[in-house]
Amino acid sequence: MPEFEECDTVTLARDRAESSLKKGALGAVVHKFTHPGLAYEVEFKGKSDRDYILLTLTPDEITAYPATASSTTPAKISASAPSRSGPRASPKA
């Protein structure tokens, strides 16, 4: 089972009824906990464009993206990806 780092893209390993997320939902690791045990804080997109779901998950609850048998290195979120706040307006002179 691979260990994940912040900004790794992961998928949910099984449905989470309490959050309405389904197996395979894409998320981003935003924090890695190592004490008292290994766990990850993962952010998932919600139902609307402004809705995000933050879950603390154990390693068996997430898988590397893309989830393939030969996948050993988790994908990273691109630094050029648009931010949640959307595009910035240019200042007017």
Image (spheres, helix red, strand yellow):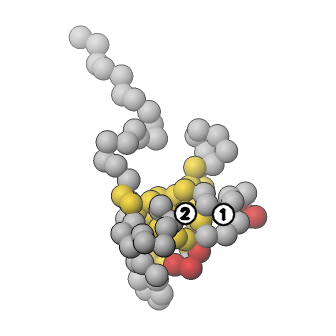
Residue at (42, 78) in percent of width and height: 2
Disc 2 target residue: 11
Q: Residue furthest front?
A: 70
Looking at the rendered structure, the number of numbered marks drawn on it comes to 2
Question: Left or right of 5: which side holds 16?
Answer: right
Alpha carbons under labels 2 and 1: distance apart = 7 Å
Contact between labelled residues 1 and 2, with CB atoms less than 8 Å apart: yes
Mark on residue 45? Answer: none
Name the quadrant of the C terminus: top left
Mark on residue 23? Answer: 1
Q: Residue furthest left?
A: 93
Q: Amino acid at mark 2?
A: Thr
Q: Would you say residue 43 is visible in this rendering?
A: no
Q: Would you say residue 35 is visible in this rendering?
A: yes
Residue at (47, 62) in percent of width and height: 65
Secondary element at tag 1? loop
Question: Left or right of 25: which side holds 92?
Answer: left
Q: Amino acid at mark 1?
A: Lys
State whether residue 46 is above or below residue 64. Answer: above
Q: Nearer the viewer, residue 2 or 50?
A: 2
Q: Residue furthest top?
A: 93
